[in-house]
Image: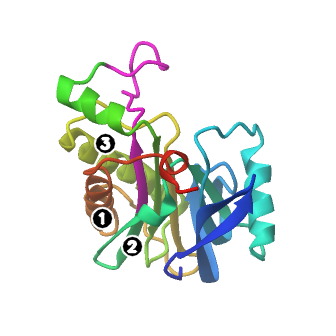
Amino acid sequence: MLTEPTLTSRHEDGRDVPLLVWRADRPLLTVSSAPLGGGIGVRHWVVNATVPMSYHRDDPADHLAELAEQLGLDGPGVGLLTGVDVAEVVARVDSAVRVWATVGLGTPVQAAAPDPAVATPAPAPARCAASAHRVGTVNIVVEVPARLGDAALVNAVATATEAKAQAIRELGLAATGTPTDAVTVLCPADGEPSAYGGPRSAWGAPLARAVHAAVLAGGAGTVVPWSERRTA
């Protein structure tokens, strides 16, 4: 299965920029909305890379592939980007389902807001909290220890997203997420596939609890973008 993530860095634009790397001891069946390795397929690793708030590359998949090559990662994998310092990753476990989340809630939005570019106004305390940590992007990585069928994998992404939205609401934000959130769910590629990944299914229920706990913990404090608080 997945190793615990390794925190490392790469030298980029004159700075040492952090990133997290998970390696799989065998290929894992994966569903992801990540810029690199998105969709459903077999993957060998996951990278969650911090980028500065001034990030302007329009080829994030190519950028992440370059980082994977620098790290010596073989085979297809998943690559995520965030303005959050990935050293602040939050890990939670529930019934052998493992979750890691990097949580930035500075650009909260309601998914079905009339104008997708504008978040539904939040209560005053929530607006104050958001202004204190502008960095937005919630990246969630989930490992389920049992094989999920393709439909169950898609269902698991929905379950993780619902749990994330529940946590964000409990944090006092009138939002369902940010415009750049990503979810990755990994499971063994062999074995009898489970048909369900919903919040009351055998694996969806602990997945939901672990995601909820991770996002709630990660969003509880002030998150300052890595590029605005790094030391020279």
Q: Quadrant of the C terminus?
A: bottom right
Q: Residue at x 44, y 77 (%)?
A: 146
Q: Amino acid at mark 3?
A: Ala
- What amino acid is found at the position of numbered circle 1 in the picture? Ala
User: Does the magenta portion include 230?
Assistant: no
Front one among 189 and 12: 12
Q: What residue sits right under mark 2 in the picture?
A: 98
In the picture of the structure, the residue carrying the numbered disc 3 is: 165
Which residues are drawn in magenta? Answer: 101-120
Q: CA distance from mark 1 to mark 2?
A: 7 Å
What main secondary structure does the magenta stretch of the protein show? loop
Residue 76: where, in percent of width, then height? 74, 67
Q: Quadrant of residue 45?
A: bottom right
3 and 2 marks in contact (CB < 8 Å): no
> In the drawing, does residue 72 fall left or right of residue 163?
right
Q: Is residue 119 a member of the stretch shown in magenta?
A: yes
